[in-house]
Image (cartoon, coloured by chain):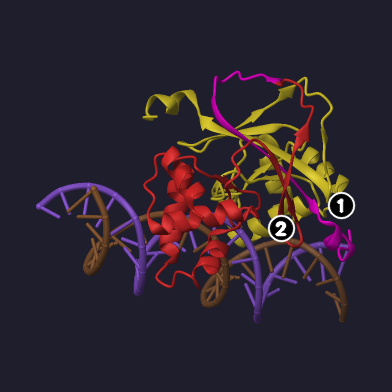
Chain colours: A red, B yellow, C brown, D purple
DNA sequence: CTTTGTGCAAATTCTTTGCACCAAA
DNA sequence: TTTGGTGCAAAGAATTTGCACAAAG
């Protein structure tokens, strides 16, 4: 059911076209931090009229409206996450998979902000190796 | 004087060629998180034989040897930082400038790591607007 | 010599843009 | 009938690769 996807879009002021709903629903039910390419390839079999430009357009719109979060870790592919709660990410240097990590017990943090920067959002990510990959890597 | 640059390279097991020294020295005295392009353009006038490929080669080598840190925030340009102490970054959404931010009083952090991921490094960055840019942005 | 560093040009990859068409309000 | 969503092809930008030459030990 894409009623959840629909209300999510409406909540953030995004008009729910069929393609937008499909992508939103895909993101909500596949919290694997997919790339634009991944999303396109997954949906194309079911929506043969879908174009990659549209996927990029829609992801950009979603990000601007803050419906989803864009995750940039390796500078190669931008990944997308329908889970916009505050959490950290991990990416394996070898296979590239991205996992969620939830930090516990983080004390209130203060920081010097001598330049009076306006801070919008905070991203935390770790890099390393997943158990499968670490075996096959000479480190 | 590039004696600091030289000892830095030797410390991390990088043979100090002239180009490597020049780039290392540039990074150590310009903690502005430059891009590969920025480094190339800054050094080219003084080293006319320098090629961009070499800049990329050397930066990649430095990063692998952990002489410097690569900073990926916007997925557009990788930036490089000779300051490898643990600190956070800020990038302005408008002008793209990157600043350092130092977090104080962070309590020991625990996290669930159900997948037994091997965590190598941690990056923290904020996005927002610098004081100059926030004026000219309708938000 | 043999290894390593460098450089040119071409290729690759991800993403954006220009523009035209189509659908909905 | 005006706005906005979509799609194709081309452009763009950052980085990598293949290969050849040069330098160093």
- Is residue A127 a member of the stretch shown in magenta? yes
Question: In this picture, is D23 found above or below A104?
Answer: below
Mark 1 neighbour class, 10 Å CA radius: few under 14, some 14 to 19, many 20 or more: few
Q: Is residue A69 visible?
A: yes
Q: Is residue A123 above or below residue A131?
A: above
Total marks in image? 2
User: x and y percent of residue C20 in the render?
Assistant: 22, 68
Q: Which residue is mark 2?
A: A97
Residue shown at 46% from the left, 46% from the top: A62
Picture layout, residue A114 above or below residue A86:
above
Residue B34 picture quarter: top right
Screen quadrant of the C terminus of chain A? bottom right
The magenta segment is A110-139
Quickly name the residue at label 1.
B13
| Chain letter for the residue marked with disc 1 in the picture | B
- Estimate the spatial distance between the alpha carbons at disc 1 and disc 2, rounded to whole Å: 30 Å
SS category of the residue bearing label 2: loop
Q: Whole-percent x and y of residue B29?
A: 67, 35
């Amino acid at each position: 059911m894409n009623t959840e996807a629909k209300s999510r879009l409406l909540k953030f002021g995004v008009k729910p076209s069929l393609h937008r709903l499909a992508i939103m629903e895909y993101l909500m039910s596949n919290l694997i931090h997919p790339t634009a390419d991944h999303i396109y390839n997954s949906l194309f079999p079911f929506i043969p009229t879908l174009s990659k430009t549209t996927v990029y357009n829609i992801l950009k719109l979603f990000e601007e409206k803050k419906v989803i979060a864009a995750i940039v870790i390796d500078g190669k592919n931008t990944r997308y996450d329908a889970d916009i709660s505050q959490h950290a990410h991990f990416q394996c240097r070898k296979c590239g998979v991205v996992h969620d990590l939830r930090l516990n017990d983080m004390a209130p943090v203060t920081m010097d902000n001598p330049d009076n920067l306006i801070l919008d959002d905070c991203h935390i990510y770790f890099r390393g190796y997943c158990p499968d990959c670490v075996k096959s890597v000479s480190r």
